[in-house]
């Protein structure tokens, strides 16, 4: 009798919310009842809906349980697995309608997605190559091995696939350059140094479908005549690395990697290089320097890696998601692939939804979907029903788009016009409580800390921009600061060595463009409308709401609040450090800022 | 090699394909400022002072790393370029000690030169400055990393030419500095004190200890000569002030590209060692007594003649010197051979 | 030099320093290049970074070993076994350049027969190297399009020194690595103007440009030019001069800018010889250890206080220019020599160094086209026979100086003094980066003497453990000729059974220990091997 399959998400998100403990409890419960052999419990890659983890799906009915904790195991087994009754309270509850949903396909978060690259994530066991194969895995490779190399490159070109790592360069063109570059020895490198704050697309793909990346690399390697490859993955992704290692081992055993792959005469050796977590190593020349054992610092281009890359040899670098698209293109054909998306942006894109959004998680959508659909239909809108203020897209190199831009179709070119970039797919949603000057300051802090220090505009320039932003958020801004910011931003964009520096001013430029008022308020009126720049606000007790419960008094770390029980409390602004603890604790909304 | 036609500052020129904009400009007699460029080293493209405007390019490419392309139209001093260079200079000044009045590098400092050229009187940017301890622990040079502009030439020289690999960039962002592994004192690192870093530093971050306060570049005479140590035959300039050597600087146009080692670069101060022999000495009763040249030379000549007359010329022997000049070795053997013996040799065998 | 002169007809470095950077293969033997010739060491490392293959043969683990494809840590004094075995492998595997051998060499048959017995296994026993390393090294050298050999005193300062050099020359001839860029046999000269001193005839058997004193025609030319009669009998070498002094054949000696008391082997013997002289003149910058023996000491000037020319190791004639006035009453050597000559009754009237140089040029065919004006910032490589000749960076192109290149069959012989029960260690000597020769200059330089103050004898950790010695311990190093007390450095740079000392420090004068046995041809002493024992002091 065949086993029933229970899938649990074993991505980093769900594991940290307790998926493995819940799994163990479930197994224990099944053992207690002597039912263990009736069920096959499979850990899958990320389902994307991290907000709701740990996630379990019971097959064949595909019941989608979320937030499953160890103590839920007994009920889950008793009710669902023994009695066939759905455990309603563990189903997903639509945040707007309040309705419980049984099948994930009916959840708004999934309904509008188009899961191609993430197709296997959350479905197959990433540690089992057979599952990948039965999901048509390595068919793209088999097809490619029978094709002319130029034909493969042509296929990828005509699919319209563009790099998913940031700049959106045509993948087929990149392959073509490397293919045409002179040299016996060539390399293919997978850039898995995902570093944007809040972005985890690549991690999820590696964790959930590592073979797709390997297959993509194999196809690329075969096409460009590379016999050696590296996956450069940050060491902070231990699960991705371990799954990748397992996948490489299995692929070797199955003859997909190594000597004379599938009898084609093509050989390919794949290595993993763990990065030490420098953001700049996501820049391709710095990444190559790091693989070579040098300090990760960008090198001037030209020469481009396609001509002189790793150890001076022609090297093709593609990002994880880009490579994961490749098997799909080969398998289904460029035409089918190009049918998805817009005129100049083809296929799908995975976004990491974070910030003040209800459905934090990963979502894959066809190119061209509007920002509104992504944020509100898939993302479930802004948390706590607050007002949408802006979305930062493209990480620290990207831009900040205001509500007026919500109907912008998300594709490479529209984003660029709006002052943002696709980047690797980080989407951070901000509400009215986010100060846009402070946000710019946050990103500048990040880029300044992560600047490799090589070129003067980036190293010294972002420091001075950051200092100006710090002064503004502290209420010490001066009027010329805005001009200085603008001038510095342009000079840094104009003259920095690498992409990190050239895009570092983007968060400032885009917030200056869309939120100039906020900057001016800070400088001229000493006011932060979001109430987050602590130097510009004071806390006070809103007398109408205070009942004198004393909770705020207890929680204040500096004893700045005084007042008898049941009497209106007071805040000593000289002592108050504006930590916000009182606001958080007050149930009556009696503490406010101005 | 194929040629490409380009336009620099409105002038049409033809250059070899593959040359950089910087090289092309130089050939056309146009000076582009550089901090981090050195023809011998890997191209870094780090300082961005050499950016130029190329028609059609999105941003301002660094001329030192960008190869020319057919039809390229380049402006090396457009307003946009000048603005960018000024920003770079002001950014440096915002984080550089303003002590040119007493800086040893005054007069040969590129930061000064370019500040003069682009009329930079200081920085408009306020804020934090580096505060790194002044390092005077090694016997040969001072390291004032607060003056370092992180062009990285010292690092590349150390890695690519010397091979010692004693220094590299450490830390990130504003905290980036050039130092040894784990920031140990340089004399505990793999540094071999060739001093090539000192000579290539465009600012006053690295200063030789010898000759301190005895003359800046415009106050010294430079005499090209050849090293008196090993057989490599490095040529260099002796920097002379008041009839004293106060330093050495490499001959970058020489056959060895200005490469140096610790002995040639720093080991010349024996010249004015207190124990130099300054007068001829004649031993009398087992003690050396000062003598005049006339006395000494007469005595030597007479002794040689006496011995020759008494025992034959082959009782004389001369040890010439692999340290003396050709002219001196020539005269030495000429003297002995003229005295009638071929008993002349030197220490080539040791 | 004698070895190369036999093989090629000229004893100088065949190629240039600049070429090394673009070399495809470098074989460094008996040369701690990065310490003794730092600037050449840079080029070697640069070449490796550009992809050149490197083989290092040395008893010590030197810095270049870090860059080497193969490090051959051979026993001191076993060069010939290694080199002959490499020749054996090259011939056996057909890697020799038959065309070159046929057209440009002679004596191949003899060489082939001689190296027949030097199988890698046979050589392995003598050198202590794994046989397969010898084979690999031979293949790398033999297969390279152009391979350059660099060597220094580690090859020559042996009783087999000349034969060692011949064995090197054999390899280069065998593979056609002569007369082309990036190849050649390159002895790196240890002192700024050894090449020049030799070129100038500061040798017992030749005038300038290696014109033999025994050659009547040459001698007549010089006699006419100098207006004096000249002896046809070749003179004595340094080592012969000292023993000559000992038995009173030599009565008076003039030492200019040398410190033989420290630099020559078996110091006790040197002292004995110098004491036996009737009259000794020493000319130097300082009161050196040798000067103390003198009857007259003449103060000379440093390179910065005079004008002239030096010839570097690659035969490049370069200008020395005066930067300072002479200190005190010190005079340039040439003026002092002229002074003696005048007092001796010769009519010499040189007014400046250039006068002398013009005379040199007029008498020396290989310098004939050189003038001070032509030297400029880069100098000129001799031979430069005419005023329009650009100089000769690479020697022996198309034709050897002697016509055909000559193979010479040579056999391994143990060093004159091998370790035994009483003296179980092999002492090998040399220099370090921070000091130069007998330290006359470097030890009077503040920075250099501060960074490296004293002798640190290198001893292998295993030997140190066996003797109960540790880093910085003081030990007495004792040979059959003397004893020296020195501080220890325990390091893997030296193999077990071998210790290394420098000759920079008079207070730990290593030449008290060394053996004055010389190579019978070149008369170079065996400074690289003698037997010593160690005792904790």
Image: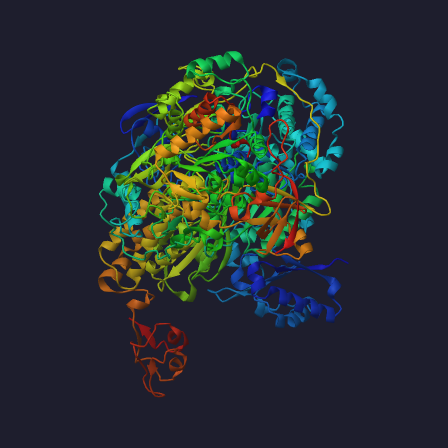
Closer to the camera in the image, A95 or C262: C262
**Residue A23 or residue C492, whichever sits in front:** C492
Determine which quarter of the picture holds residue B80. Answer: top left
Identify which residue, A107 or A273, lies in the foreground.
A273
Q: Nearer the viewer, residue A321 or B156?
A: B156
Label total for image: 0
* Point 22% across, 54% down: residue: A480
Q: Is residue B218 above or below residue B343?
A: below
Q: State the image coordinates of residue C25 (x, y, percent, origin top left).
A: 58, 30
**Residue A387 found in image quarter:** bottom left
Res. A129 visible in picture: yes
- Placement of the N terminus of chain A among the 4 image quadrants: bottom right
Q: Is residue B57 above or below residue C467?
A: above
Q: Quadrant of the C terminus of chain A?
A: bottom left
Judge from the rendering whether residue A390 lies leftward or rightward of residue C252; answer left or right.
Answer: left
In the image as oriented, which residue stretches furthest toward the right?
A1
How far across and down, in percent of the image, does residue B43 sit? 42, 37
Position of residue B7 relative to residue A214, above or below, is above
């Amino acid at each position: 009798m065949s086993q029933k399959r229970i899938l649990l998400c074993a991505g980093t998100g769900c594991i940290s919310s307790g998926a493995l403990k819940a799994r163990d409890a479930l197994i224990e419960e099944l053992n207690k009842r002597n039912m263990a052999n009736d069920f096959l419990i499979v850990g899958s890659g990320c389902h994307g809906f991290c907000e709701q983890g740990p996630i379990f799906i019971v097959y064949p009915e595909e019941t989608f349980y979320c937030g499953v904790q160890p103590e839920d195991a007994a009920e889950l087994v008793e009710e669902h697995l023994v009695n066939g009754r759905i455990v309603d309270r563990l189903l997903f509850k639509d945040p707007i309608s309040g309705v419980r949903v049984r099948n994930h396909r009916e959840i708004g978060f999934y309904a509008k997605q188009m899961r191609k690259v993430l197709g296997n994530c959350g479905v197959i066991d990433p540690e089992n190559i057979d599952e990948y194969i039965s999901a048509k895995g390595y068919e793209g490779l088999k097809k490619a091995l029978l094709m002319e190399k130029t034909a493969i490159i042509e296929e990828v070109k005509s699919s319209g696939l563009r790099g998913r790592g940031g700049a959106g360069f045509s993948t087929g063109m990149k392959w073509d350059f490397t293919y045409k570059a002179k040299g016996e020895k060539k390399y293919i490198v997978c850039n898995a140094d995902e570093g944007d704050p809040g972005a985890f697309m690549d991690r999820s793909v590696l964790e959930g479908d590592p073979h797709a990346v390997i297959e993509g690399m194999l196809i690329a390697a075969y096409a460009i005549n590379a016999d050696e490859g590296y996956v450069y993955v940050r060491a902070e992704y231990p699960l991705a690395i371990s799954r990748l290692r397992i996948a490489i081992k299995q692929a070797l055993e199955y003859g997909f990697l190594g000597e004379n792959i599938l009898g084609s005469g093509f050989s390919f050796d794949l290595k993993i290089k763990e990065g030490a977590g420098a953001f700049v190593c996501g820049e391709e020349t710095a990444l190559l320097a790091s693989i070579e054992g040098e300090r990760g610092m960008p090198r001037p281009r030209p020469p481009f890696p396609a001509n002189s890359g790793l150890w001076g040899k022609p090297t093709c670098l593609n990002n994880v998601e880009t490579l994961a698209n490749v098997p799909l293109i080969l398998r289904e054909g460029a035409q089918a692939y190009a049918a998805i998306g817009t005129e100049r942006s083809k296929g799908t894109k995975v976004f990491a939804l974070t910030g003040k959004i209800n459905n934090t998680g990963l979502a894959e959508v066809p190119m061209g979907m509007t920002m509104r659909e992504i944020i509100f239909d898939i993302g479930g809108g802004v948390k706590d029903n607050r007002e949408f203020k802006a979305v930062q897209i493209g990480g620290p190199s990207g831009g900040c788009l205001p509500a007026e831009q919500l109907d912008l179709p998300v594709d490479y070119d529209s984003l660029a016009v709006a002052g943002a970039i696709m980047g690797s797919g980080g989407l951070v949603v901000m509400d009215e409580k986010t100060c846009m000057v402070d946000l710019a300051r946050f990103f500048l802090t990040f880029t300044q800390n992560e600047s490799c220090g090589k070129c003067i505009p980036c190293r010294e320039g972002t420091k001075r921009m950051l200092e100006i932003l710090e002064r503004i958020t502290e209420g010490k801004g001066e009027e010329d600061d805005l001009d200085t910011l603008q001038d510095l931003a342009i000079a840094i964009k104009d003259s920095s060595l690498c992409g990190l520096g050239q895009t570092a001013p983007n968060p400032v430029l885009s917030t200056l463009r869309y939120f100039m008022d906020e900057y001016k308020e800070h400088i001229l009126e000493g006011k932060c409308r979001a109430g987050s720049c602590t130097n510009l606000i004071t806390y006070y007790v809103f007398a109408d709401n205070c009942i004198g419960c004393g909770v705020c008094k207890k929680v204040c770390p500096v004893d700045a609040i005084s007042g008898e029980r049941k009497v209106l409390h007071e805040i000593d602004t000289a002592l108050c450090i504006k930590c916000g603890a009182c606001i958080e604790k007050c149930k009556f909304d009696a503490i406010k800022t101005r | 090699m194929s040629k490409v036609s380009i336009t620099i500052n409105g002038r049409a020129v033809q250059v070899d394909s593959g040359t950089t904009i910087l090289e092309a400009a130089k050939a056309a007699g146009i000076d582009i400022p550089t901090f981090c460029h050195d023809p011998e080293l890997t191209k870094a493209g780090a300082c961005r002072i050499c950016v130029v405007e190329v028609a059609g390019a999105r941003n301002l490419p660094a001329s030192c790393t960008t190869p020319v392309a057919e039809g390229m139209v380049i402006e090396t001093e457009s307003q946009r370029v000048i603005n960018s260079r000024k920003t770079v200079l002001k950014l440096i000044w915002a984080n550089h000690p303003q002590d040119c009045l007493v800086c040893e590098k005054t007069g040969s400092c590129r930061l000064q030169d370019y500040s003069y050229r682009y009329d930079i009187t200081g920085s408009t940017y306020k804020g934090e400055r580096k505060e790194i301890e002044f390092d005077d622990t090694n016997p040969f040079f001072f390291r004032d990393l607060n003056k370092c502009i992180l062009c990285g030439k010292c690092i590349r020289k150390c890695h690519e030419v010397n091979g010692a690999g004693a220094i590299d960039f450490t830390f990130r962002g504003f905290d980036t500095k050039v130092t040894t592994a784990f920031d140990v004192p340089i004399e505990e690192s793999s540094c071999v004190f060739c001093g090539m870093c000192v000579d290539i530093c465009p600012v006053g971050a690295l200063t030789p200890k010898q000759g301190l306060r005895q003359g800046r570049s415009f106050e010294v005479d430079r005499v090209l000569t050849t090293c008196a140590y090993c057989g490599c035959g490095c040529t260099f300039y002796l920097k002379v002030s008041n009839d004293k050597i106060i330093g050495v600087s490499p001959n970058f146009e020489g056959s060895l590209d200005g490469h140096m080692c610790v002995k040639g670069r720093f080991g010349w101060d024996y010249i004015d060692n207190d124990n130099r022999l300054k007068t001829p000495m004649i031993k009398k009763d087992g003690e050396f007594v000062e003598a005049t040249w006339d006395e000494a030379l007469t005595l030597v000549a007479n002794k040689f003649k006496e011995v020759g007359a008494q025992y034959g010329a082959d009782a004389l022997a001369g040890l010439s010197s692999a340290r003396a000049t050709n002219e001196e070795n020539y005269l030495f053997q000429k003297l002995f051979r003229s005295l009638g013996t071929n008993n002349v040799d030197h220490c080539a065998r040791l | 030099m004698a070895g190369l002169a036999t093989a090629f007809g000229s004893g100088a470095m065949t190629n240039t320093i600049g070429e090394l950077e673009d070399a495809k293969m470098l074989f460094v033997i008996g040369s701690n290049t990065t310490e003794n010739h730092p600037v050449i060491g840079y080029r070697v490392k640069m070449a490796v970074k550009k992809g050149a293959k490197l083989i290092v043969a040395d008893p010590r683990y030197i810095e270049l070993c870090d860059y080497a494809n193969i490090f051959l840590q051979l026993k001191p004094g076993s060069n010939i076994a290694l080199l002959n075995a490499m020749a054996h492998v090259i011939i056996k595997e057909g890697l020799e350049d038959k065309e070159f051998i046929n057209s440009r060499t002679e004596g191949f048959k003899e060489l082939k027969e001689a190296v027949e017995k030097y199988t890698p296994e046979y050589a392995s026993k003598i050198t202590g190297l794994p046989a397969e390393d010898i084979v690999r090294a031979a293949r790398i050298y033999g297969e390279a399009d152009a391979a350059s050999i660099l060597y220094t005193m580690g090859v020559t300062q042996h009783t087999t020194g000349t034969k060692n050099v011949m064995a090197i020359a054999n390899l280069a001839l065998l593979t056609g690595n002569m007369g082309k860029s990036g190849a050649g046999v390159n002895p790196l000269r240890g002192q700024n103007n050894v090449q020049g001193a030799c070129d100038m005839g500061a040798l017992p058997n030749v005038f300038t440009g290696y014109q033999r004193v025994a050659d009547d025609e040459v001698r007549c030319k010089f006699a006419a030019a100098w207006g004096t009669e000249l002896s046809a009998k070749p003179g004595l070498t340094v080592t012969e001069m000292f023993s000559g002094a000992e038995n009173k054949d030599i009565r008076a000696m003039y030492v200019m800018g040398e410190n033989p008391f420290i630099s020559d082997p078996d110091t006790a013997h040197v002292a004995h010889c110098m004491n036996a002289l009737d009259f000794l003149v020493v000319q130097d910058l300082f009161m050196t250890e040798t000067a103390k023996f003198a009857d007259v000491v003449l103060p000379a000037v440093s390179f910065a206080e005079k004008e002239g020319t030096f010839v570097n190791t690659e035969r490049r004639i370069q200008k020395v220019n005066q930067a300072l006035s002479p200190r005190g009453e010190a005079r340039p050597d040439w003026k002092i020599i002229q002074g003696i000559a005048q007092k001796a009754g010769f009519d010499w009237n040189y007014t400046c160094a250039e006068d002398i140089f013009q005379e040199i040029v007029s008498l020396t065919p290989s310098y004939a086209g050189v003038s001070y004006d032509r030297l400029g910032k880069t100098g000129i490589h001799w031979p430069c026979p005419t005023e329009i000749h650009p100089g000769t960076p690479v020697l022996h192109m198309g034709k050897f100086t002697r016509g055909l290149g000559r193979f010479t069959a040579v056999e391994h012989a143990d060093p004159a003094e091998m370790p035994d029960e009483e003296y179980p260690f092999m002492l090998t000597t040399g220099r370090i980066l921070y000091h130069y020769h007998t330290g006359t200059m470097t030890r009077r330089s503040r920075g250099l003497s501060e960074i490296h103050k004293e002798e640190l004898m290198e001893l292998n950790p295993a030997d140190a453990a066996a003797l109960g010695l540790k880093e910085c311990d003081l030990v007495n190093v004792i040979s059959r000729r003397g004893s020296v007390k020195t501080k220890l450095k325990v390091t893997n740079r030296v193999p077990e059974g071998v210790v290394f000392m420098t000759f920079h420090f008079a207070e730990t004068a290593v030449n008290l220990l060394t053996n004055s046995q010389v190579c019978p041809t070149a008369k170079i002493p065996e400074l690289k091997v003698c037997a010593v024992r160690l005792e904790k002091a």
